[in-house]
Image (cartoon, helix red, strand yellow):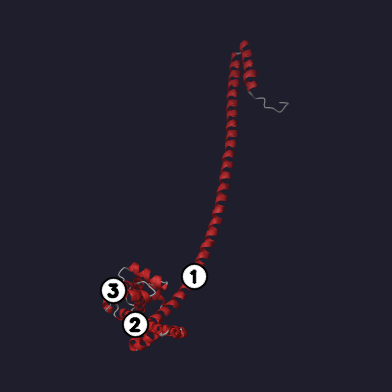
Amino acid sequence: MSHGRDTVDYTYSNTILMNKARVLQALGRYEEAINTGMRAYNLSDSLTRRIKEQNATWLSEKMGKKVLKSYIENQDKQLTRNRWANIIMGVLLFICITLIVFIIRDNRIIKNKNRVSSSLIGELSKYKTELFDRMSEHPDKVNNAASADDKASATDDKGKAVNSGETVKTEKKTDSNAHNEEYEQFLKIEKMIFEKNLFIRTKLSRTEVAAEAGMSTSHFNAVFDKYSQLTFTNYINNLRMERAAKLLKEKPNYTIEAIAQECGVPVKQTFYRLFSKKYGMTPADYRDNI
């Protein structure tokens, strides 16, 4: 007790008290010996329970600290992950907002361009119709326009023609006449296709157009390939799309499928593809813009 230690320990219970019990037993004081022995056993049990409780408390505290530390570490990791997730979400949200702003701006620009394009398409269609009407009224002007380039080239080569003699003049005149005649035939073919609406036939071939023009297929191919800047299929498709643009403007109550049928393109997807390729917008956008 002078050293400040607990005197009730295993030494006291198992040694001192047990020896005292033995001494009392030897002295014949059996009742006191039994009480002392029972006291020693009780103290020993009490010490054992106390030590077990202390060990359990220590272990619980140690495990609790370990579990708490692990929990805190997991929470820190979760907070770090959440922080990075919030940063990434913020960046993605900023990018999405920026893209939406650019898309809205581009859509406005595209709508303005489509509006202008729609107006130009209508003007070009009107101009083409007027051109064919004037060709019908004044065929002599068409012939003069067809031979304009040949006259210019004849004027530039005038000196050479004089020096080459009458034979060269005759050859050039013959070539010029042949050129004028072929070009006039090409213009007549264009006019006939446009006036008779041959292009609205679903499957139109060169042979059919040649027969309508009263030409052989070979001669038609030669004239068409010489003066047309497009293949026959693209040429016909262009006429179909020009008619489609005209109908979209003049027939607002027609469905797009009906207009596709009217233009000789029964497949809706093909009609959309050809129209978008020519005018840079869908038929629906064109109708909205006009």
Front label number (2 vs 3): 2
Measured in 3D between alpha carbons, the distance from the residue under mark 2 to the one under mark 1, in whole angstroms, is: 50 Å
Q: Quadrant of the C terminus?
A: bottom left
Residue 197 found in image quarter: bottom left
Marking on residue 217: 3
Please say if 80 is above or below 38.
below
Compare residues 187 and 202 and report the one nearer the observer: 187
Residue under pointer 2: 181
Q: Distance between the residues labelled 2 and 3?
A: 17 Å
Q: Is mark 3 on a helix, strand or loop?
A: helix
Observer-nearest of 254 and 240? 240
Which part of the image, by quadrant, shows the N terminus? top right
User: In the image, what residue type sits under mark 2?
Assistant: Glu
User: For residue 106, which numbered disc appears in the image?
Assistant: 1
Residue 54, relative to residue 252: is it above or below?
above
As helix, strand or loop, the secondary structure at mark 2 comes to: helix
Question: Between residues 224 and 48, which one lies in front from this camera angle?
Answer: 224
Q: Residue at x 36, y 87 (%)?
A: 134
Residue 94 coordinates in the image, percent (x, y)? 54, 62
Residue 107: x percent and y percent? 47, 71
